[in-house]
Image (spheres, helix red, strand yellow):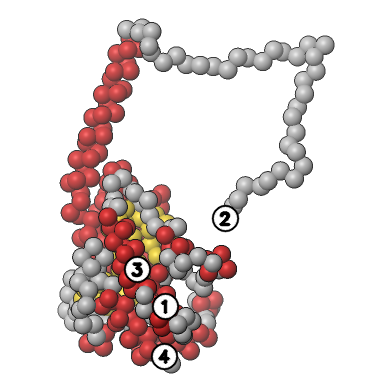
């Protein structure tokens, strides 16, 4: 799509200031909405094939400054997918348990299984972004993490994961407008955070951190896409369109996989029916539990009770 810059080779020169945050001049909100809605059925179909074939998975990484629209993108794009096979993870400050492991431990735990879609709201890149800018660890440590991230994403790709990474590129002026809107809208006031304003004072530092991360961690199997994010409607369309474009090449393969699997299961069912009709002794026999004897005057029915302090199901 126009105004979308893709980096898929390591070492590219990245200069965010030279990349537009606005949609193309001739684009319109109405046409973008029509196109977005037309993608819904296709995305649903592609995800359904992904789920059934279980030969690949999809990881969508969303990064961006505060108010760039990570939550909004998830809300609109994920709405076209079947929630059965989608899970969203938001990465915040590491817990004590997470800090006791390597920085990728908490990320690997929520990568998608074959057939699934995972969406990351922020991600493992925070460990070379906020960690770097705020000097939470020594430079000698966070600098080694680029190689670790590349190896991690390469491993995912080798096991069938389609990795797509998006930087939602918002201008400083539009970010300020959105932050101020939150103060005036009671339904958005819960998002107010003084840290968002403090981070604006380090705009250039974060810019440099993003540029280095995108440059050092771009690859054909894990590309970075810089998405103009000043217009929400265009941002959502770009992400939806690029996901569909990334999945389309696998459609024929997934359909073939499902066709083969369908024939296999159909043959198994036909063989079972033939065996059953012939009364073959090898046919499976339905096993029913032996009925319990009815209570008599000499035998009392005993109703088992749960022991005190029985564990409750984990509702997390």
Is 284 displayed left or right of 16 in the figure?
right
Give the crowd class for mark 3: few <14, some 14-19, many >=20 residues within 10 Å: many
Which quadrant, please, contains the N terminus? bottom left
Q: Secondary structure at mark 1?
A: helix
Residue contact between numbered discs 2 and 1, judged by CB atoms under 8 Å: no
Residue that carries the numbered disc 2 in the rendered image = 316
Give the crowd class for mark 2: few <14, some 14-19, many >=20 residues within 10 Å: few
Q: Secondary structure at mark 2?
A: loop
| Vertical arrangement, residue 251 with respect to residue 169, above or below | above
Q: Secondary structure at mark 4?
A: loop
Q: On the image, which quarter does residue 211 sit in?
A: bottom left
Q: Considering only order in the chain, which callout, 4 or 2, is on the residue closer to the N terminus?
A: 4
Q: Considering only order in the chain, which callout, 4 or 1, is on the residue closer to the N terminus?
A: 1
Q: Considering only order in the chain, which callout, 1 or 2, is on the residue closer to the N terminus?
A: 1
Q: Nearer the viewer, residue 43 or 249?
A: 249
Q: On the image, which quarter does residue 163 sit in?
A: bottom left
| Vertical arrangement, residue 281 with respect to residue 265, above or below | above
Q: How many marks?
A: 4
Give the crowd class for mark 4: few <14, some 14-19, many >=20 residues within 10 Å: few
Residue that carries the numbered disc 1 in the rendered image = 141
User: Label for residue 149?
Assistant: 3
Q: CA distance from mark 2 to mark 1?
A: 33 Å
Q: Considering only order in the chain, which callout, 3 or 2, is on the residue closer to the N terminus?
A: 3
Q: Considering only order in the chain, which callout, 3 or 1, is on the residue closer to the N terminus?
A: 1
User: Label for residue 202?
Assistant: 4
Of tags 4 and 3, the one toward the viewer is 3
Q: Residue at x 30, y 52 (%)?
A: 159
């Amino acid at each position: 799509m126009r105004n979308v810059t893709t980096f898929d080779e390591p070492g590219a020169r990245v200069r965010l200031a030279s990349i537009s945050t606005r949609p193309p001049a001739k684009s319109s909100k109405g046409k973008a909405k029509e196109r977005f809605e037309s993608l819904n059925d296709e995305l649903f179909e592609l995800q359904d094939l992904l789920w059934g074939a279980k030969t690949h998975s999809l990881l969508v990484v969303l990064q961006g400054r505060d108010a760039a629209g990570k939550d909004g993108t998830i809300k609109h794009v994920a709405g076209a997918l079947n929630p059965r096979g989608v899970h969203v993870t938001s990465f915040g400050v590491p817990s004590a348990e997470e800090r006791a492991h390597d920085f990728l431990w908490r990320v690997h735990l929520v990568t998608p299984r074959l057939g699934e879609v995972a969406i990351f709201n922020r991600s493992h890149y925070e460990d070379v972004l906020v960690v770097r800018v705020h000097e939470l660890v020594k430079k000698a440590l966070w600098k080694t993490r680029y190689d670790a991230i590349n190896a991690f994403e390469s491993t995912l790709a080798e096991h069938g994961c389609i990795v797509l990474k998006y930087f939602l590129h918002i201008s400083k002026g539009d970010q300020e407008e959105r932050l101020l809107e939150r103060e005036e809208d009671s339904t958005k006031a819960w998002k107010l955070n003084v840290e968002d304003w403090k981070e604006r004072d380090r705009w250039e530092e974060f810019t440099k951190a993003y540029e280095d991360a995108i440059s050092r961690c771009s690859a054909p199997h894990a590309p970075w896409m810089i998405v103009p994010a000043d217009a929400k409607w265009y941002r959502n369309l770009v992400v939806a369109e690029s996901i569909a474009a990334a999945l389309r090449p696998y459609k024929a393969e997934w359909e073939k996989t499902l066709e083969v699997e369908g024939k296999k299961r159909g043959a198994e069912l036909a063989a079972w029916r033939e065996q059953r009709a012939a009364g073959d002794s090898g046919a499976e026999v339905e096993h029913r539990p032996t009925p319990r004897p009815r209570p008599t005057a000499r035998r009392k029915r005993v109703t088992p009770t749960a022991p005190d302090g029985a564990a409750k199901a984990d509702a997390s």
